[in-house]
Image (spheres, helix red, strand yellow):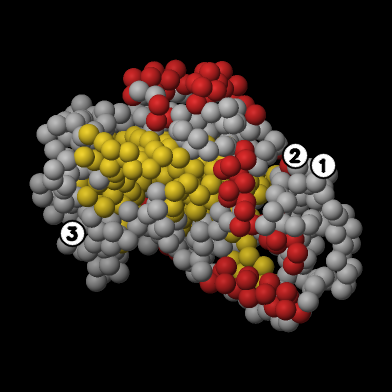
Amino acid sequence: MAAEGGGKEMNEIKTQFTTREGVYKLLTHSEYSRPNRVPFNSQGSNPVKVSFVNVNDQSGNGERICFNVGRELYFYIYKGVRKAADLSKPIDKRIYKGTQPTCHDFNHLTATAESVSLLVGFSAGQVQLIDPIKKETSKLFNEERLIDKSRVTCVKWVSGSESLFLVAHSTGSMYLYNVEHACGTTAPHYQLLKQGDSYAVYTCKSKSTRNPLLKWTVGEGALNEFAFSPDGKFLACVSQDGFLRVFNFDAVELHGTMKSYFGGLLCVCWSPDGKYIVAGGEDDLVTVWSFSDCRVIARGHGHKSWVSVVSFDHYTTSVEETEPMEFSGSDEDFQDHMHFGRDRANSTQSRLSKRNSTDSRPVSVTYRFGSVGQDTQLCLWDLTEDILFPHLPLSRTRTHTNVMNATCPPLSGVSVLVGTNPGTNGNNGVSVGSNPGNSLPTPLPRSNSLPHSAGNTANSKSSIIDGTVATGTSKFATLSLHERKERHHEKDHKRNHSMGHISSKSSDKLNLLTKTKADPAKTLGTTLCPRMEDVPLLEPLICKKIAHERLTVLIFLEDCIVTACQEGFICTWARPGKGGLLSSQNQANSPSGTVV
């Protein structure tokens, strides 16, 4: 993956980059790929995906890696930053005929050194359960394609379960399976369980329990990815219709929605504490959505093409001191802020870099997340408290009843408030400062309004659902599979996919169903999809070209970052100070690499 000679500097592939933590270095000896290391001809193939599992073996080298390249699936011991990869000895290798693996997921609860449970989804719709260590006879779900004939887009074990898993398809349907149950020899018959705005959930009618246990129909077009919240109670889904939908998984209820700026949403992830969701897609943006407020709080612009993966870095989310600041409000409010900051950091499932704080130096939290895209670039982003809580010193602003004019300097002991109309909030947004210790928000050169509702936070969910996306009979549930499939093919892979295109196709049927339902083209400027000038715009910490082909994988591990591209190369980037011997070998053997 070193840069080719003679290319322009801007097109050279970077082999290291620097952030405030230090230098991240590409370990060329830790590159995983097919054993022959030949770049894969990716035309017409499914994205390369990577899954990790730790089997906790006694050797201390318990990490295992699985990745798909074309028709092939590989399972290796992952040596990471410690030792060079040995591609000649895969633990398991499978080559499939007539179908290709599209996605996979390990069950982390049941994994041991002797056995792992790996789910693999396929382009023809089947899902296979295999054990690449034991290599025993596997189970095949949807074998006859009676449940769904379309490509599997995402498969994951249900959080905290040893037997339940969820599968999404390009039809826009999701199915809940139990590994212990059979799929039946006939097509399933469904009974409506619950219906809401643009979604419906069905149970499977049969005399004996069979798969699927539940069928979800969500939005229009393909359901591209879903992700469980860290506590496993909520499910975030992103679809080709451009909507993020967040469900209470057990209650089967819609919690909130968000609309992309345009085009489909392709990827989604949760912050380690479950308070924020980041989505990316065909608008080339990363969008940060608040789970509690059900609204967009920031967008990030750095990619030049579709964003294919977003992921939070649990290991770099940090707690830091901030400079002493003026605080308008009571001592109790101030202590609440201190306690809140610590709670947020302690609830992350990561190792935090903590610093001592004093009474005069409140604690602030920085969330780190990353994104990769079809532009072959890796972007890293910091989400800081001046974006999350632009007016945190004012306790009243957290209730969304009033907003503070950010251009006025805060006065000690005095609350500076500006009364605003809920539809035209006048508070200025803030940009991410390069100094994380800067506690005072700085206005953007343009006016950035944060669209707060006039009500309190508790009402924000219902106001979005009832006001902007009025409740009513789900449009999706009224369409036949044939109609949906035609629409999916018409819209799939259209780079100029616009909201107007969606609305023109759907407005007639929407008007028949309910006159109060919002036209998707009219969501721009609402809480579903704020205008670009209405929310803070993040700039990436780094934005580097790291591959020749589009990037399809971004995973943050404790001592490294793992990326992969469509050529089938899985790259390991050592975190600062973690490279060790392999890093020095890279310096000697990769003279053509570009140093940033």
Mark 2 or 3: the one toward you: 2
Numbered label attached to residue 533: 2
Q: Position of residue 339 (x, y in %)?
A: 63, 75
Q: Residue furthest bottom?
A: 359
Closer to the camera, 429 or 374? 429
Q: Left or right: where does residue 321 sit relative to residue 55?
A: right
In this picture, is 281 found above or below 358?
Answer: above
Marked residue nearer the N-terminal end (1 or 2): 1
The percent position of residue 325, horizontal first and vertical second, equals 81, 71
Foreground label between 3 and 1: 1
Q: Residues within 10 Å of mark 1 (few under 14, many from 20)?
A: few
Position in image of residue 330 (x %, y %): 78, 76
Residue, disc 1: 446
Q: CA distance from mark 1 to mark 2?
A: 7 Å
In three-dimensional space, the C-alpha distance between marks 2 and 3, rounded to whole angstroms, equals 52 Å
Q: Is residue 471 above or below residue 323?
A: above
Which callout, 3 or 1, points at the residue further toward the start of the chain? 3
Residue drawn where x is 85% and y is 66% of the image: 415
The disc, 2 or 3, on the residue closer to the chain's N-terminal end is 3
Secondary structure category for the residue under label 2: helix
Most foreground residue, 11 or 501? 501
Question: Which residue carries the number 3 mark?
Answer: 115
Mark 1 touching mark 2, by CB under 8 A? Answer: yes
Q: Amino acid at mark 3?
A: Ser
Q: Is residue 364 visible?
A: yes
